């Protein structure tokens, strides 16, 4: 259930156009003025955030590395203030509905940035924020320029790595134990990225002088990382003895973070209550399905009296139907065209055969998370390939592979592919990249993106995918329970006192998860905040909007009409899409 973190992206700056007069009666003049203002602001933004730029395929500043010191935080806050000031000069009443949403979205994004720096201050207590591996790995592994040019970018950035980690050490103040341990583990992993870079440099056409410099700077960078790890290791006993900050962020910060990150139509409390109700309703429906399936999978055996035991026993039996480790990647590959055909035949959402999904084995440097995820280009480079990274199971122990394949059994694997690929993340991001609104693609809303993928599963099953089989629906409900229970535990972990033992009991009994999956979830719940609610929040909001539109349009409602229009607004939060869908559809 992973999509790579939404990346900021920007279209190449087009030739500057003359600034329209401030007061203009011409329709659309203010919209154009806003669009131009956004372009200029983003140009400044990329200069301050070269790593984000590289992550979205904007390589103008690819030879820069940001040192996360007080000066860089001040520069960011100054830019936020300047842009907010500029946005305040636009009169929403003179903008089209779409530009009005852009204005609010951009403003919200800048206010969120400010809140993260000034109030949330994770730059002080999350040592795991500091890791240069990913941006270097991306540069070494993405052919955005000839190798020698990329290596010269790497060489320039390497020079600043010691300053980067010195600033990191100066920033850390009473971190959590969990983020400290994660930082130690991930930075140890980072060392190998530099080995890889050095090998590439030595085999390249760089001058001997540059090769020597490459070696010196790589050694200095590795020493800086080792020094950072040693610094964190030295803090560890004190943190373990009670000196750490709690990973629980508490109700006040949780509500604020929920507002900034999720941009939901619900409050955090409302969403929590909704998730509790949804869990009860899913259990009711799952019980009915389990009773239907019992004779088929258990024959004459007596049914357990406890309904959760009954549902769990049926799911256990179904989980035994799965592919084998050696066929895993191929099975995924074969399913994609079948899903595309189903979407086409049932007229569910527009596809684009000119931009196919490339299924591949996950590149080595991106492995580490099991399973599958979509790696899509940003709007900056919309014609680049979209990859479906699938990790082969060949380095798994037989026990681990078996447990993984039971989870991604014959039904679940199809649901996973629907979620990640068609009509889930791949199709959604493909539509998002076609929107003309830069802001709506850029300041992507994770709840909308995850919500769509979950909603897409339901669209498929409601259209008859899987032949309405009880097995398919039951396994889907198990998967859906995961999103629902993610919302419940995230809220209880951060605003209450839910501990690991109670959480594992809850997820194994009420969400039918394995011990291993539940234990992983505990780790994720302590390392992240609010993000686990995004799946269910987005899904619940989209479903409500779909039902509202269906009631309003009556005979004129069409599944494809709704889906295409919904996806035409980029990655905007659902509450804004809802507003825009109140307007008459564009001709
Ligand atoms: Zn997802
Ligand atoms: Zn098995």
Image (tube, rainbow, N blue to C red):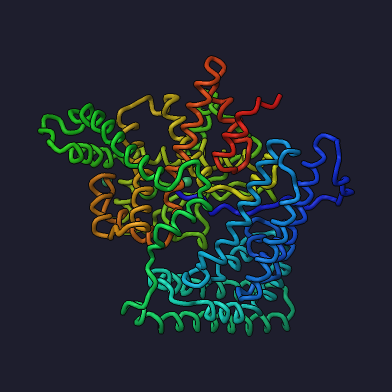
- Which residue lies at the image location 44% right of the left edge and 56% below the top edge? 254
Observer able to see residue 479: no
State which quadrant residue 282 falls in: top left
**359 or 533, which is in the foreground?**
533
- Which residue lies at the image location 71% right of the left edge and 24% below the top edge? 587
479 relative position to 79: left or right:
left
250 relative position to 151: left or right:
left
**151 or 153, which is in the foreground?**
153
How many marks are shown on the rendered structure? 0
265 relative position to 204: left or right:
left
Percent across and percent down for residue 449 are: 53, 44
Percent across and percent down for residue 249 are: 41, 62
Percent across and percent down for residue 1 are: 44, 47
187 relative position to 66: left or right:
left
- Which residue lies at the image location 27% right of the left edge and 36% below the top edge? 283
Observer able to see residue 56: yes
**578 or 513, which is in the foreground?**
578
| Figure check: 143 above or below 96 | below
| Figure check: 415 above or below 190 | above
- Which residue lies at the image location 68% right of the left edge and 41% below the top edge? 100
| Figure check: 74 above or below 447 | below
Percent across and percent down for residue 462 are: 42, 26
State which quadrant residue 301 falls in: top left
């Amino acid at each position: 259930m992973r999509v790579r973190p939404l990346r900021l992206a920007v279209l190449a700056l087009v030739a500057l156009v003359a600034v329209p007069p401030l007061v203009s009666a011409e329709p659309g003049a203010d919209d154009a003025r806003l669009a131009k203002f956004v372009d200029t602001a983003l140009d400044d933004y990329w200069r301050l955030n070269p790593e984000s730029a590289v992550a979205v395929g904007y390589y103008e500043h690819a030879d820069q590395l940001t040192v996360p010191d007080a000066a860089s935080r001040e520069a960011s806050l100054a830019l936020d203030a300047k842009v907010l000031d500029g946005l305040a000069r636009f009169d929403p009443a003179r903008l089209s509905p779409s530009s009005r949403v852009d204005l609010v979205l951009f403003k919200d994004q800048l206010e969120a940035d400010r809140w993260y720096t000034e109030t949330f201050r994770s730059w002080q207590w999350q040592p795991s924020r500091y890791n240069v591996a990913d941006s270097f790995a991306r540069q070494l592994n993405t052919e955005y320029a000839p190798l020698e040019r990329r290596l010269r970018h790497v060489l320039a950035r390497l020079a600043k790595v010691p300053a980067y980690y010195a600033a990191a050490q100066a920033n850390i103040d009473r971190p959590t134990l969990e983020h400290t341990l994660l930082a130690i583990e991930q930075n140890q992993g980072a060392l190998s990225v530099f080995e890889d870079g050095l090998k590439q440099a030595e085999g390249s056409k760089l001058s001997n002088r540059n090769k020597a410099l490459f070696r010196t700077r790589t050694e200095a960078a590795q020493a800086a990382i080792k020094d950072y790890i040693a610094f964190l290791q030295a803090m560890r006993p004190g943190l373990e003895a009670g000196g750490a900050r709690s990973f629980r962020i508490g109700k006040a910060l949780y509500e604020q973070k929920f507002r900034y990150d999720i941009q939901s139509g619900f409050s955090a409390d409302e969403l929590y209550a909704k998730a509790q109700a949804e869990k009860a309703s899913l259990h009711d429906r799952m019980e009915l399905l389990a009773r239907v399936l019992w004779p088929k999978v258990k024959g004459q055996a007596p049914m357990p009296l406890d309904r959760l035991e009954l549902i769990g026993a049926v799911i256990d039996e179904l989980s035994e139907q799965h592919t084998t480790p050696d066929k895993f990647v191929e099975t995924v590959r074969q399913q994609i065209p079948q899903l595309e055909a189903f979407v086409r035949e049932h007229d569910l959402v527009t596809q684009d055969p000119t931009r196919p999904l490339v299924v591949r084995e996950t590149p080595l440097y991106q492995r580490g998370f099991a399973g599958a995820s979509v790696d899509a280009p940003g709007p900056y480079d919309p014609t680049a390939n979209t990859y479906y990274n699938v990790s082969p199971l060949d380095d798994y122990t037989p026990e681990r592979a078996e447990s993984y394949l039971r989870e991604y059994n014959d039904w679940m694997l199809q649901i996973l592919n629907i979620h990640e690929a068609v009509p889930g993340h791949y199709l959604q991001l493909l539509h998002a990249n076609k929107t003309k609104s830069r802001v709506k693609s850029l300041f992507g809303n994770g709840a909308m993106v995850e919500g769509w993928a979950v909603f897409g599963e339901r669209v498929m099953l409601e259209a008859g995918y899987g032949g309405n089989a009880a097995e398919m629906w039951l396994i889907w409900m198990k998967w859906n329970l995961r999103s629902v229970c993610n919302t419940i535990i995230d809220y209880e972990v951060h605003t209450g006192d839910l501990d690991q033992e109670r959480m594992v009991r809850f997820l194994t009994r009420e969400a039918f998860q394995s011990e291993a999956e539940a234990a992983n979830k505990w780790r994720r719940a302590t390392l992240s905040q609010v993000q686990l609610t995004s799946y269910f929040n987005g899904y619940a909001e989209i479903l409500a909007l779909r039902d509202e539109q269906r009631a309003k349009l009556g005979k004129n409602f069409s599944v494809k009409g709704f889906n295409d229009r919904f996806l035409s607004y980029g990655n905007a939060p659902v509450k804004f899409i809802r507003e825009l869908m109140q307007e008459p559809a564009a001709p």
